[in-house]
Image (spheres, helix red, strand yellow):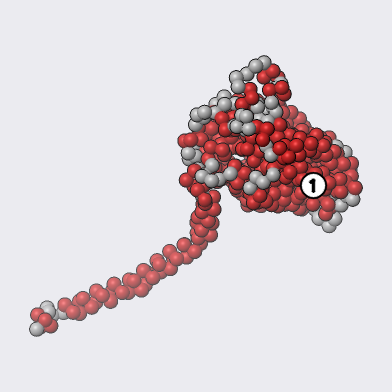
Amino acid sequence: MAAAKTPPGATGTGGSKGVKGNSRLNGPGRLGGSLRAVGRALHFPVTGTARGIRKATHAHGAGESGLGKLIELHGVNGAGDVMITVALASTVFFSVPTDEARGRVALYLAITMAPFTLLAPVIGPLLDRIPHGRRAAMAGAMLARALLAIVLSGAVVSGGLELYPAALGVLVSSKAYGVVRSAVVPRLLPPRFSLVKANSRVTLGGLLATGIAAPIGAGLQQIGPRWPLFGAFVLFVAGTILSFTLPPKVDSAKGEDRALLAADEQHLHGPHRQPVKRPGLRTVGPAVTHALAANAAIRCLTGFLIFFLAFLLREHPISGQSAAVSLGIVGVSAGVGNALGTAVGAWLRSRAPEIIIVTVVAGVAGAAITAAVFFSAVLVAGLAAIAGFAQALAKLSLDALIQRDVPELVRTSAFARSETLLQMSWVLGGAVGIAMPLNGTAGLAVGAAIVGAGWLTTVRGLLGSARRGGTGRARVA
């Protein structure tokens, strides 16, 4: 009966429509699905990698506290800086003969590093006076480098004198970002997260981003000298935007005060010789001052090795390798050592920071002496790796001491000011490295003397602090 009531041709029509619909699904529809699948497969490496990075940086409460965003911002910062480094190194260092390059780099240091040495002591105190604008300060440092990258993109082609003031601006902006970043980390600690672990994550994120960006920058350099700077511009613009995505608590300075980098009231100097408000609370303690001096020695050695080995390996490259490859081997060794030191520091979790500092400084001094006496390419690469390892581990141990011994209300300021001092030490080491004659044994002996002096002047104080177990600051903690 149902079949009898069906209008004639209805079944055929419906069947025809059904066939047409199936043909659409099986024809163009299937093609569209295939194209979408191919599109997903092509962009999966990008989106999948991005999701993996976000998952890693936001793990263990770092996403909720805002630390994950700071890790990502620091990665962008490191990638942008290495792009500029690639462009400037190719312009100032690799584009001319060694003798001329030495003069150009010396001029570069004189025009950029000398003013920076005068400006660096001002950066920390200046930022202390604007504690409510940390996000704006980081964004300003990023935006300044984005604009200066465009200026440099013209200078690297024309060879104009604007290269030098623009490079100085990039350097100052980069160091200002570093000082602010050090001050921001304590404000973004997740629950049950040590400062050492947080700093190690931030540092490792920057190292990984630098390792990824360096070969990309080198590839862009092959297209043209401007292209790494265009890449830096894009990265720093992204960093400017990311800076404002940090939590508002970054700009909160409630209950904070400015630190004095002195062991106690008797060691105040400069304008603080006069009585200051609560000086005992604002001084950082003897363990921190000794640890800071030891870290300054390692940072000075690092700056020295960068410039000294750059010229030494260009003149006397590793056997069978070009100058660029030789420098790349040493650079990779230093990066691997730094990453390993960061990982070990996070694993040790602030255990006996004084002993760690004494040990790693002694180790890098011994490595420098060995490399000086038995000079060879393998020992130079090993020294770079050990120096990178020591720098990372000693800095994390300094962070642990600041967290342990420095009162919370001046802890952020202590980080900012200590980072400024370490940057100045790096500049001093670089100046010594550029002035040294290209003799491997003599140069590395000077490097050993730098770090050895730092070790001898701090070992007694650090070991004494370790025996006391940090109880010397109990009265102000």
Q: Position of residue 396 (x, y in %)?
A: 66, 43
Q: The disc labelled 1 sits on which kind of residue?
A: Gly
Residue 237 in the image, given as x and y percentages of width and height: 54, 40
Name the element at disc 1.
helix
Tell me, yes or no, if residue 173 can be seen here: no
Quadrant position of residue 195: top right
Q: Which image quadrant is residue 87 in?
A: top right
State the residue at coordinates (52%, 51%). 59
Question: At which x and y percent is residue 63?
Answer: 49, 47
Q: Which residue occupies the foreground of this view, 434 or 458?
A: 458
Crowd tier of the residue under label 1, counting other residues whose Cα lies within 10 Å: few below 14, some 14–19, many 20 or above: some
Give the labeled residue for mark 1. Answer: 363
Q: Residue at x 86, y 45 (%)?
A: 369
Residue 397: in sight, yes or no?
Answer: yes
The residue drawn where x is 32% and y is 74% is: 23
Q: Is residue 426 left or right of residue 312?
A: left
